[in-house]
Image (tube, rainbow, N blue to C red):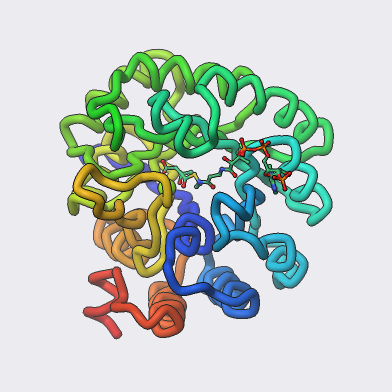
């Protein structure tokens, strides 16, 4: 099997996870979760989101979360910023890395950030410019890379077009979001085959929600195709509040970080995470949220 020797894990639980939880999580619990994740060896943690609190109330306290994070030179704490207002909040919080988020579906773009794909890219350009001039790195997300809750199947050409524009404005990496988890190894392979014609593998990451139970299989095919950055969410927390399925059900969280780490261990791929400590963090937040741990490995090894 052709696999990378090392994978960089992007932990998105405190953002992608908690943004979609019904139970409000207090600031200290968020900070404690992030501290436990950093202690487990996760070197990149998406710790919050500077979006409108009217749109996503769960992320309202991100400014305070950032002010309380344990300082440590080994961990990058990142945040989403949808516009200049969000970027200015990130700047005030001394955030070292931000992520902008576009979509490959017009309807999803409208529902999620209230503008078209082209308008969102126009909005991100000055944000990226400001960020780079302040030595803040910018990551780019694309949602709905294989399927959209409103439009169905999404064309890989659209994903390629959005990805190239995000890279051109200075994003160092594009995270490909299967927002509603409809992808299978076949559709993910097809998407990556198309993107890799124009974009080197080291500029791409995968962000795979597990709604249909395909996320780990989709990670594996991505690794086999040369991708070595994988987003994941501790205890499988989360989803996107603007990604309801056609039957009204919510889309699930990302592949659980514990399940990803267990698989990488089995494949002999380095990642730098202590599985036992990670499971501790997953149990901590699951208890706080009073929900069953969404990681199978978290349950099997507790
Ligand atoms: P809008 O209503 O068009 O914004 O929303 P606006 O510029 O017209 O401003 C309206 C109000 O919002 C104003 O306040 C602004 O001050 C305020 P008012 O005058 O009414 O009191 N506002 C803000 N407040 C704080 N921080 C800000 C901000 N911006 C405006 N940054 C907007 C446009 C983009 C703001 C809104 O649609 C929004 O916040 N959307 C975010 C939705 C979101 O967070 N979705 C989840 C994250 S994306 C995701 O999960 C997918 C991903 O995981 C990948 C995948 O899985 O595919 C990344
Ligand atoms: Mg997501």
Q: Nearer the viewer, residue 249 or 272?
A: 249
> Which residue occupies 22% across, 79% down?
300
Residue 190 in the figure: left or right of residue 15 = left
Q: Is residue 268 visible?
A: no
Q: Image quadrant of residue 235?
A: bottom left
Please tell me whether residue 145 is drawn above or below residue 57 in the rendered image. Answer: above
Please tell me whether residue 279 is drawn above or below residue 145 in the rendered image. Answer: below
Q: Position of residue 292 (x, y in %)?
A: 29, 78
Locate the C terminus and report the quarter of the image it occupies: bottom left
Please tell me whether residue 11 is drawn above or below residue 142 in the rendered image. Answer: below
Please tell me whether residue 157 is drawn above or below residue 172 in the rendered image. Answer: above
Residue 119 in the figure: left or right of residue 109 = right
Locate the N terminus and report the quarter of the image it occupies: top left
> Which residue occupies 60% across, 74% down?
35
Q: Image quadrant of residue 238?
A: bottom left
Q: Is residue 50 visible?
A: yes
Q: How many labels does the image show?
A: 0
> Which residue occupies 45% across, 20% down?
199
> Which residue occupies 55% across, 17% down?
118
In what quadrant does ligand 1 lie? top right
Q: Where is residue 290 in the image (x, y as percent from the top left)?
A: 37, 82
Q: Nearer the viewer, residue 86 or 134?
A: 86
Q: Nearer the viewer, residue 212 or 222?
A: 212
Q: Position of residue 193 (x, y in %)?
A: 28, 21
Q: Position of residue 225 (x, y in %)?
A: 29, 32
């Amino acid at each position: 099997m052709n696999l990378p020797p090392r994978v960089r894990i992007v932990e998105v639980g405190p953002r992608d996870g908690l943004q979609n939880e019904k139970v409000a999580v207090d600031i200290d619990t968020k900070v404690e979760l992030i501290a436990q994740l950093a202690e487990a060896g996760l070197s990149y943690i998406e710790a919050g989101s500077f979006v409108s609190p009217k749109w996503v109330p769960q992320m309202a306290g991100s400014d305070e979360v950032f002010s309380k994070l344990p300082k440590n030179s080994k961990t990058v704490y990142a945040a989403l910023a949808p516009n200049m207002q969000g970027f200015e909040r990130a700047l005030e919080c001394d955030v070292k890395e931000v992520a902008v988020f576009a979509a490959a579906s017009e309807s999803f773009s409208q529902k999620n950030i209230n503008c078209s794909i082209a308008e969102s890219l126009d909005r991100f350009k000055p944000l990226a410019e400001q960020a780079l001039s302040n030595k803040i790195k910018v990551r780019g997300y694309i949602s709905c890379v294989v399927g959209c809750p409103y439009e169905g199947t999404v064309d890989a050409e659209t994903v390629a077009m959005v990805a190239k524009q995000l890279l051109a404005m200075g994003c160092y990496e594009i995270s490909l979001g299967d927002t509603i988890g409809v992808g299978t190894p076949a559709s993910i392979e097809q998407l990556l085959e198309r993107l890799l014609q124009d974009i080197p593998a080291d500029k791409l990451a995968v962000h795979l929600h597990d709604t249909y139970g395909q996320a780990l299989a989709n990670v594996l095919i991505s690794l086999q195709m040369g991708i070595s950055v994988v987003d994941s969410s501790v205890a499988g927390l989360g989803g996107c509040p603007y990604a309801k399925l056609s039957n009204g059900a919510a889309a699930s969280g990302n592949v659980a970080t514990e399940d990803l780490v267990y698989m990488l261990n089995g494949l002999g791929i380095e990642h730098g995470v202590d599985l036992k400590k990670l499971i501790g963090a997953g149990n901590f937040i699951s208890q706080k949220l009073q929900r069953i741990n969404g990681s199978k490995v978290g349950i099997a090894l507790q």
